[in-house]
Image: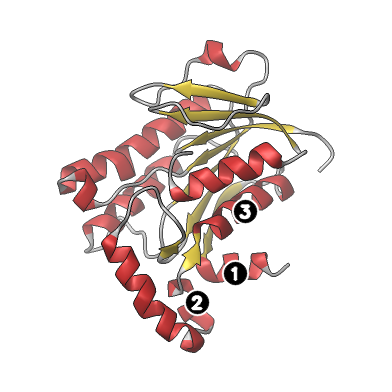
Amino acid sequence: MSDSISIIIAGSTGLIGHHLLNFALKSEDVECVYSLSRRPIEEACTKLTQLVTPDLSIDKMALADNKPSIGFITLGTTIKKAGSKAALKAVDASLVVDVAQSMHEVGVEHVYIVSCIGASSSALSHYLKCKGEMEDKVTQVGFKSVTFMQPGPLAGDRTEVRKDETFLQGVMTVLNPLMKGFLLNYKPIEGEVVAQCMLDLAFENQDLMGIHRYTSKEMFRLQKK
């Protein structure tokens, strides 16, 4: 990549977002990083600008002359943490769409969003349905390109413990040797790997157009390059 870029990350306090932020701050290809969050983060770096708002809205004046061209959204919750199906949808669908719209309004042309394997607006699962509805709406916002990362079970250290994921990771560790081909989409993938793939794809595809999706199988393949 010949020119340095400015990016904006929503969800930098989560598993994937935290890794993404650290990778971006260390990258010589990134000139400016905007972190959009509800509370201040601990990282300190001269090229980091924190945008802290309760509703994750974006203040155009805070972007100065270094407007971001690439956006990353790694927001998400669980029904246990949210407390209800409606509250989960408010985060995983409505909030993500609102943030994407705000990013588009301040000049972001390419957006990378963490979704999940099996996301579909026609899914029977409420969680998968929310992710699918989010994908459908974001594709209508008007970005030059939208890339959805669709990982299976996530592995890695979180600031919060999700017992369901911990249990699933234990089961899948036993099954890992058997997981090949399409089944790789359901093999636990480190949040760090997802984050690195997102950043690498953004660097390599600045002229990208259209809608794109990457499952865990494809992310494992990218990791080996």
Outermost residue toward the left? 84
Q: Which mark is residue 220?
A: 1
**From mark 1 to mark 2, how far is it between C-alphas?**
8 Å
Q: Going from the N terminus, do you reach mark 1 or mark 3 first?
A: 3
| Nearer to the camera, 91 or 176 | 176
User: Residue at label 3?
Assistant: 196
Q: Residue placed at 64% from the left, 31% from the top?
A: 69
Secondary element under disc 2, as helix, strand or loop, is helix
Q: Of the residues shown, which amino acid type is indicated by label 2?
A: Leu
Q: Amino acid at mark 3?
A: Gln
Q: Is residue 25 left or right of residue 186?
A: right
The secondary structure type at the circle numbered 1 is: helix
Q: Earlier in the sequence, mark 3 or mark 2?
A: 2
> Residue at 50% of width from left, 77% of height from top?
184
- Mark 2 Cα shell of 10 Å, populated few (<14), some (14-19), many (≥20): many
Q: Residue furthest top?
A: 61
In the image, residue 109 sits, relative to residue 213, either above or below, namely above
Residue 34 sits in quarter: top right
Q: Is residue 146 visible?
A: no
The image's colouring method is: secondary structure
Check disc 2 and report the residue beneath it.
Answer: 184
